[in-house]
Image (cartoon, rainbow, N blue to C red):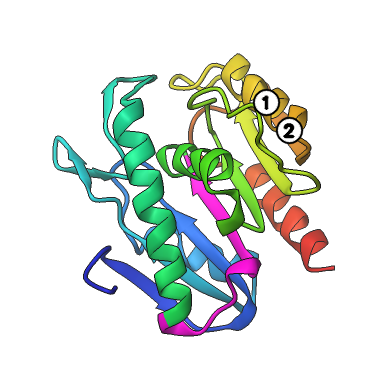
């Protein structure tokens, strides 16, 4: 299993594991310190995307900025979901406690996982995501907590894209928290981090 994705694993509460999914050009180490800060005591599972775009790791291919390679995304969504299940077995954490925290490219594959393999994620924080593709009509996300954070000055993801994702998630029963900052771009802001921390704290009860 460990050969499948280069990754970082840090054990924690086996019923609460943060799945960290980096943005384009990131690595398995990028979000680890943020994950520790946001969810103290949780386990951390942080894979590195296998696709290289001009030498920069990603989780799936794209044809151009904002134009996703959907067949590749579907294939790699399944591959990542299967790997998470295998990792849970190897490392001894509960798959029913996996919370995705994805940024940009990582947020998009996390959204795809909610659409395609919802049983693998208990919840997801999607930072600067787009609607990757329309969800299947029979998708049931009833009461699945999802945080969506977007910015009005995001040069890669128009705000309407994130709003379309929110509507699609809500239409299939997800409990969506939407945080929008008209002044924010594609990078993470302090407000994004604070909002994610609040949302995670509420999940933990």
Which circle marks residue 172 in the picture? 2
| Near-viewer residue (77 or 66) | 77
Do the CB atoms of the residues marked 1 and 2 lie less than 8 Å apart?
Answer: yes
| Residue shown at 70% from the left, 52% from the top | 194
Name the residue at the front extreme: 138
Q: Is mark 2 on a helix, strand or loop?
A: loop
User: What residue occupies the far right of the structure in this picture?
Assistant: 205
Name the secondary structure under disc 1: helix
Side (left or right) of 112 relative to 181: left
State the residue at coordinates (50%, 72%): 44
Q: Tell me where residue 67 appears, x and y as whole percent.
A: 35, 18
Residue at which label 1 appears: 168
Q: In which quarter of the image is residue 169?
A: top right
- The 10 Å Cα crowd at callout 2, few under 14, some 14 to 19, many 20 or more, is some
Q: Which quadrant of the structure image shows residue 3? A: bottom left
Quadrant location of the N terminus? bottom left
Give the magenta range.
Answer: 90-103
Residue at 50% across / 38% down in the picture? 112
Q: Residue 9 carries which label?
A: none
Which residue is painted at 72% across and 59% down in the image? 200
């Amino acid at each position: 299993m460990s050969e499948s994705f280069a990754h970082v694993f840090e054990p924690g509460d086996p019923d609460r594991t943060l799945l960290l999914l980096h943005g384009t050009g990131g690595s398995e180490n990028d979000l680890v310190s943020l994950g520790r800060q946001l969810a103290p005591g949780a386990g951390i599972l942080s894979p590195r995307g296998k696709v290289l775009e001009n030498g920069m790791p990603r989780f799936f291919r794209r044809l151009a900025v904002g134009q996703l390679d959907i067949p590749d995304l579907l294939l790699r969504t399944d591959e990542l979901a299967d790997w998470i299940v295998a990792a849970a077995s190897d490392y001894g954490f509960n798959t029913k406690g996996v919370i995705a925290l994805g940024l940009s490219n990582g947020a998009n594959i996390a959204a795809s996982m909610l659409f395609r393999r919802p049983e693998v994620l208990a919840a997801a924080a999607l930072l600067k995501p787009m609607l990757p593709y329309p969800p299947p009509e029979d998708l049931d996300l009833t009461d699945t907590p999802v945080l969506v954070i977007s910015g009005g000055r995001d040069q890669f993801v128009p705000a309407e894209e994130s709003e379309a994702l929110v509507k699609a998630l809500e239409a299939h029963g997800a409990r969506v928290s939407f945080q929008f900052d008209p002044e924010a771009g594609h990078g993470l802001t302090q407000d994004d981090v604070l909002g994610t921390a609040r949302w995670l704290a509420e999940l933990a009860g």
